[in-house]
Image: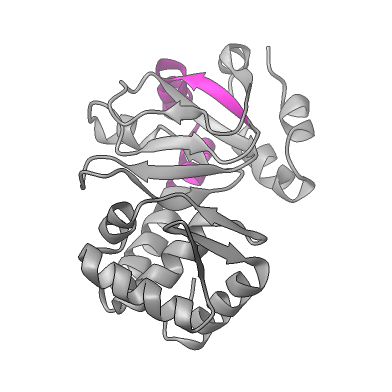
Amino acid sequence: MTTLKELLEETQECHHDMLKQLFANCPAKIMQQMQLIRMRKNRNLISTYQSSSAVFLLLSGKLQAIEERVVDIPYSFTELQPVDIVGDFELFTGIEGHYVTLKTMEASVCVKISATAYLQWMKQDANALFLRTQMLMQELSVQTQLQRQYLFMDNRTRLLLFLTRSISQKGGRLNATRERIAASIGCSVRTCNRIILTLSQEGLVDCMHGKLQISEQQITAIKKELESSSFSQ
């Protein structure tokens, strides 16, 4: 049996109040079915074409959402932080499979709940259902706002945003191909190459054997440009 105390021990103190509210009225038989799972970096938590058999609550670590349906080349488009819940949106909408693939970006700890137990919990616990509805509405509101902003971005800004989301704050090497980058920002490979050349000439990126290498200082400069533009993350 997983206890609330165990959940709190696995996550930062800033998330404790939210977890206490969420699990305040959770039936004991549901808690008994919950499992703590630990995953190493680069492991799939959920796969796009996998059936919706479980729901996960991220307690620590970080997940990346990878789109595999829209374009031919899978690409990462957002990150998920504690204490997000994943896998239940598909249950609520009644679709088969998942919208995206979720992969760990670092060692992560999650609570695993079977789909059946999770739906039973939500039906019995009005408080938990209300909190989860709030979370989903906030996420959808943010996504809608970002989509509207993204629609009016030029390709340069989209590429800079893609770089900040794909590389850590300390910098690093981006292994994505130009085709994948172009598909991610919605432009042709030729346009993508032209923008990368310009960024390289401006000192915002370095090209090593065809791959992008970005330092911590360059990431900082890129973020400053994004902050000065009309787009705010």
> Taking 98 as reference, is 17 above or below it?
below
Residue 68 in sight from this viewpoint = yes
Magenta region, residue range: 109-133
Specify whether 72 is left or right of 193.
Answer: left
Residue 172 position, x and y percent, is 60, 56
Residue drawn at 46 percent across, 38 percent down = 129
**Residue toward you, 87 or 28:** 87
> Taking 10 as reference, is 206 above or below it?
below
Residue 116 magenta: yes
Residue drawn at 68 percent across, 17 percent down = 2
Residue 228 position, x and y percent, is 51, 88
- Residue lying at the far front in this picture: please name it: 209
Specify whether 121 is left or right of 48.
Answer: right
Residue 216 position, x and y percent, is 66, 67
Residue 198: image quadrant is: bottom left
Residue 50 magenta: no
Residue 147: image quadrant is: bottom left
